[in-house]
Amino acid sequence: MKIVFMGTPDFAVPSLERLNASGHTVAAVVTAPDKPGGRGRKIQGSPVKNTALRLGLPLLQPVKLKAPEFIAELKKINPDILIVVAFRILPREVYSIARFGAVNAHASLLPKYRGAAPIHWAVLKGERETGITTFQIEDKVDTGGILLQKKIPISPEDTTGTLYEQLKVLAAETLLETLDGLEKGALKPVRQDHALATPAPKIFPEMAVLDFSESGEHIVNTARAFSPVPGARFFLNKNMIKILKCRFQPQENTNPGKLEHLSKSQFAIHCADGLIIPDEIQTEGKKRMAVRDFLNGFDLSGFGYVDENAG
């Protein structure tokens, strides 16, 4: 098939590389315009742009997807299919151009977790499995007919970061199998059961503030969901401390928010039904570190409770 590939972040890179190495033809790559990034805020291209340039693929970077010149360029290419991985919402004028329409690879088992942050929400809600769904794009976001799903388990140690790495590889495999199935006529879209849909809206840092009046299970899931970014956090005298990895120890008669010194290399915070024991943390302007290293440079003895805005 002749493909126009659409994507922006590094999540889409394995899919682009895999499709380009297949028997299909990537006729063009569409990605976001260059923008400032990094510490120096220098203008830079997206990971997908950099990959397209490395592979020698034609590149399009439209500011507006409805721009007549962009639509005309797509029609000139005359693709069989549009492949979308972590890109913008496509207008009908775009997704209806190709013979097979537009196929999106979404990082959840649709109809669960429709939206911008499906991996975060699956971890936050304590799901035991997730996966990749390929589906045909329609007007409403993430609602189109399902073509193929591949599942992976979520272990208790998994974070959004670890699942992200697994799923971006699985997306490439699922897309290639989807393309082959469509080309052979072996795949037909199956309507989603919209009654089973759950939202996965965009994540904001303020959502990552820990509330220690919650259960230990919820707090651990929150730390996993927001690791590595933006990082679940609490505050001590307005010092922000992120918990990137922690454990829960059940205990009765707790005092939520109270700090407890367990040893020279370990501390805990009371929650609704036990103790949260951090293993890896990060303070402002510092890299992630083991709690042992944190306690060597931060004296907790003067603190009895976390700040009130952390629960």
Image (cartoon, rainbow, N blue to C red):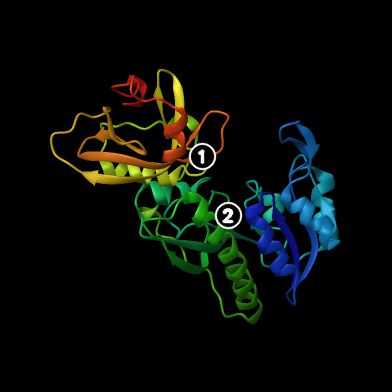
Q: Which residue is mark 1?
A: 202
Q: Secondary structure at mark 1?
A: loop
Q: Residue at x 37, y 32 (%)?
A: 210
Q: Residue at x 48, y 50 (%)?
A: 160
CA separation in Å, label 2 and label 1: 20 Å
Image coords of residue 110 (percent x, y): 45, 58
Name the residue nearer the viewer: 240 or 119.
Answer: 240
Report the quarter where the C terminus lies: top left
- What amino acid does circle 1 point to? Lys
Identify whether 158 is placed above or below 46: below
**Could you tell me which residue is drawn at 71 percent across and 62 percent down?**
16
Residue 231 lies, with reference to residue 8, above or below; the image says above
The reply to whether residue 99 is visible in this rendering is: no
* Residue assigned mark 2: 138
Tell me the quarter of the picture where residue 5 sits: bottom right
Q: Quadrant of the N terminus?
A: bottom right
Q: Is residue 214 left or right of residue 284?
A: left
Mark 2 closeness class: few <14, some 14–19, many ≥20 residues within 10 Å: some
- Disc nearer the start of the sequence (2/1): 2
Judge left or right: residue 15 versus residue 153.
right
x and y, in percent, of residue 305 in the image: 29, 23
